[in-house]
Image (tube, rainbow, N blue to C red):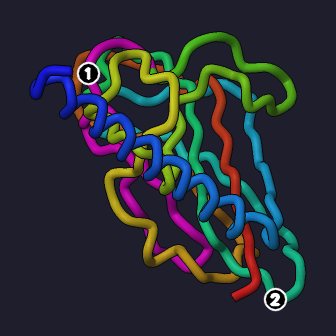
């Protein structure tokens, strides 16, 4: 084996070990957690320019003593110029975190149809705090899991009961879009 071929093999082995570690850490953390899925299948137009669409999910209850461990946001957006979009998540504590801020290129977020009931297999653009890729690593229509633009720190560890808002803003004139469906997946855990 030549000296140049060892580096890619070592890099692959290190990446595999890191992935296995993260998967085991997540499954250990998730073993004592519960999950709530909130889904909105109703398409709505995103106003062009300085407009926004707010999808509100009301969390009416949570298991006693469980707090937010992570929040995963999922979108299907039809838009000819996704770089015009800013996506945000606002928690019931009033804190807003930018999920994606003008960092996509091309047409649409996600692919495929939205159904009347939530299916994780829908071709969502998913923002998961435990994802290994940034949105810059993807390509339109960005089907897959990406890290949010901002840390969810101000939302982690809060009581999940209350109103959660997914906000899709179009900040540039010229092209209109539609939020086809969206979902919010809350993972809860005892502190």
Which structural element holds mark 1? loop
Which structural element holds mark 2? loop
The first of marks 2 and 1 along the sequence is: 2
**Residue name at image x 53 percent, y 56 percent:** 22
* Residue 94 vs residue 112, the one in the foreground: 112
Magenta stretch holds residue 59: no
* Residue 117 vs residue 121, the one in the foreground: 121
Q: Nearer the viewer, mark 2 or mark 1?
A: 2
Q: Name the residue under label 1.
A: 105
In this picture, is 81 found above or below 124?
Answer: above
The region drawn magenta spans 85-108
Q: In x, y percent, where is residue 180?
A: 61, 23
* Residue 60 vs residue 137, the one in the foreground: 137
**Residue name at image x 50 percent, y 22 percent:** 143
* Residue 71 vs residue 53, the one in the foreground: 71
Q: In x, y percent, where is residue 61?
A: 87, 73
Q: Name the residue under label 2.
A: 65
**Residue name at image x 26 percent, y 33 percent:** 136
Magenta stretch holds residue 92: yes
Tell me the number on the disc at residue 42. none
Using a 10 Å C-alpha cutoff, classify the residue at mark 2 as few (fewer than 14 neighbours), some (14 to 19) or many (20 or more). few
77 relative to 164 in the view: left or right: left
175 relative to 31 in the view: left or right: left
Gap between marks 2 and 1, in whole Å? 42 Å
In this picture, is 133 found above or below 117?
Answer: below
Quarter of the image containing the C terminus? bottom right
């Amino acid at each position: 084996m030549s000296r140049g071929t060892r580096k890619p093999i070592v890099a692959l082995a290190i990446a595999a070990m890191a992935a296995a570690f993260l998967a085991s850490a997540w499954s250990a953390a998730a073993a004592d957690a519960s999950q709530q899925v909130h889904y909105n299948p109703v398409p709505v137009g995103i106003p062009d320019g300085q407009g926004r669409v707010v999808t509100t999910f009301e969390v009416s209850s949570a298991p006693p003593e469980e707090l937010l461990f992570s929040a995963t946001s999922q979108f299907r957006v039809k838009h000819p110029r996704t770089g015009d979009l800013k996506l945000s998540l606002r928690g019931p504590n009033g804190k807003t975190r930018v999920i994606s801020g003008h960092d996509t290129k091309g047409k649409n977020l996600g692919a495929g149809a939205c159904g009347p009931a939530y299916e994780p297999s829908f071709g969502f653009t998913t923002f998961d705090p435990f994802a290994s890729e940034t949105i810059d690593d993807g390509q339109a229509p960005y089907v897959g899991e990406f890290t949010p633009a901002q840390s969810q720190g101000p939302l982690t560890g809060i009581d999940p009961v209350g109103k959660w808002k997914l906000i899709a803003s179009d900040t540039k004139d010229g092209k209109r879009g539609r939020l086809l469906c969206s979902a919010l997946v809350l993972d809860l855990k005892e502190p």
